[in-house]
Image (cartoon, coloured by chain):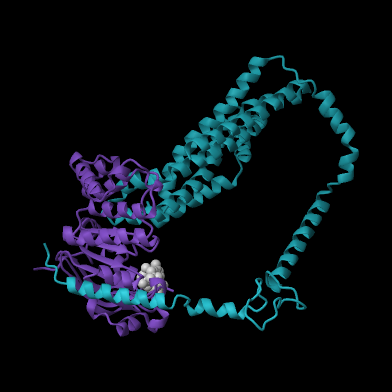
Amino acid sequence: MTPILEVCDLKKIYRGSSKPAVNRISFSMSAGEMINVIGPSGAGKSTLLRCINRLTEPSSGRVLIEGEEITGVPAAKVRALRRRVGMVFQHYNLVNRLTVMQNVMHGRLGYMNAFNGALGLYSEEDKQRALEILEQTGLSEFLYHRAGELSGGQKQRVGVVRALMQQPSILLCDEPIASLDPASAQVVMEMIRDVSVRRGIACITNLHQVDVAMRYADRIIGMNGGEIIYDGPVAGLTERMIERIYGKPMSQLMIGGDVSA
Amino acid sequence: MPEREPAREREAAREFARERETALEREPNRAPASEREPARKREPALAPDPAPGRETNPAAGREKIMLASRESRRAALVFAAVLLGLFGISTAFTQFNPLAALSAQKEFWRFIFVDFVPPYMGKWEALAGAVMQTLYMALSATGISAALSLIMSFLGTPAICPFWAVNAAVRGFASILRNIPSLVWAFILVAAFGIGAAVGVLALIIATVGSLTRYFIETLDEVAEEHMEALRSTGAATLPVVTQAILPAATPGFIAWILYCVELNIRASTILGMVGAGGIGLLMMGYIKQYNYPAASTAILAVAVIIIGVNLLTDFLRKLIL
Ligand SMILES: Nc1ncnc2c1ncn2[C@@H]1O[C@H](COP(=O)(O)OP(=O)(O)OP(=O)(O)O)[C@@H](O)[C@H]1O
Ligand SMILES: [Mg+2]
């Protein structure tokens, strides 16, 4: 079985920087797997995620989405592949003035021709599917609310639904709960796990809280200084390993569950 | 369905997290070292330290506690002194003499209250026509400018137009237009094309397009920063992203800037009239040149009424829309 996502020897050096932000990154993922990525601030977690859908241009290495290479291909091909990779952002990045429904439908734009896309002429079928997903995720009562009126947790759930509208095989989540209170964070994390379990979508989530990462993952990737220090099951993540990932003794970590400080 | 073996591992993880939590509960007062340390160092504490064996008011008998560093206070003082000096020198050079202004007051007030009062207008139709012309000038110029600026701002922001040279050209062009006041444009255009409202509109458009393009680019940049990436990540092409997300998100900003330009242009168009670009300004200038001060003062009152009225209207619209 070909892996859903394959990353081979990925490296990114930002312009004007001498040290790579990510380096020697290789791993692969199968359908429905849930990986949580942990590591101190500046470890390269966001860079890794953004290289996967080429929001950031990798310096070298290869990324394959369902066996098709996204690196080193022309822009049109990149766009076609991006449709299969949903992304969820820390700050939700919804258009606050538009309704939940309008925001969710943005997930379909990649599949439409320029004319229909530009005029927002979504097919009834797509709209029907949006209604179903919103129903399943308990958001249907907010259908015509402006996104700006929602709470942070609700916004992030809408963000996930927008990504789901792409019918992705991979979901990239960059600190999806960093701006949320603990209760909303739990709801969002459960939603992401549900996405991976029920829909068989491979989910990679960057997190700052080790305990949350361990609770919701199948597999943990620990990064430090741009490289993968640990890649394995949750059970194998010992305290010593956590200390190595964060480069700090355990006593300085885990305060309030947040190790970013 | 993918196989789900790691249930046991998840259980182990939960166990681990729970242990961690109880460990935290046992030591509830632990704060990060970085938070604990400075509290002790902060000796002249604002709140009295309840620790026994210490003075209750450690600040007593010591130097006053500064709220800002000595250097920054000195810098602020120097800055204020330089500023005051500059004002003084500038005023001296203009030969503006407050005393002379006071002593000339009688003449001034006589001029205002005797020559200009009571306002009198023989030709109400002329006045109404001129007022409407001024309004038309401002509104038409703002509308046309908004349409032109919209197109130019798309070309001017790297978020939408990927050609660096085009961005720079548009921004540069807009800067040149806006840094020359509309009054100067009106002078040039009146000299070239003669007197008339159309010339006034043209002058206003030139200056407004310069500013509005700049403001629109700012708004677009801000909005694109927030939304472009999220929508690009769905695989959408630029055009749908712009029409479906960037424009809706930028609309309130655009409207606010357009209303601002309506206000500016109402004011500007009355002044442009005075150099021959039509409207109430032209009428007023004519009366003043004919020493018909009562009629001129009526025109001035009309200007004030228009400006206040338009400002009230734009304030209302702003509240309504934004
Ligand atoms: N756009 C950029 N230009 C230059 N350097 C960058 C850029 N983005 C990130 N970096 C650098 O790359 C390194 C990795 O950053 P990255 O944002 O991937 O880390 P991160 O693990 O996501 O950190 P955080 O937990 O704080 O989000 C950092 O040293 C950062 O300064
Ligand atoms: Mg990050």
Q: Is residue A172 visible?
A: yes
Ligand 2's image quarter is bottom left
State the residue in front, B26 or B119. B26
Residue A102 visible within the image: no
Q: Is residue B93 left or right of residue B249?
A: right
* Residue beneath the point at 48% across and 40% down: B322
Q: Is residue A136 above or below residue B58?
A: above
Q: Position of residue A14 (x, y in %)?
A: 37, 72
x%, y% of residue A172? 27, 63
Quadrant occupied by the N terminus of chain B: bottom left
Colour purple, chain: A
Q: Residue A8's quadrant in the figure?
A: bottom left
**Numbered disc total:** 0
The single residue placed furthest to the right in the displayed view is B103
| Relative image position of residue A236 (x, y in whole percent) | 23, 80
Q: Residue furthest left?
A: A1
| Camera-side residue of B198 and A210 | A210
Q: Would you place residue A210 above or below residue A178 in this image? A: below
Q: Nearer the viewer, residue B314 or A61?
A: B314
Q: Residue at x 51, y 41 (%)?
A: B256
Left-right relation of B261 to A260 = right
Rendered colour, chain B: cyan
The front one of B209 and A154 is: A154
Q: Is residue B58 above or below residue B99?
A: below
Residue B273 x %, y %: 64, 30
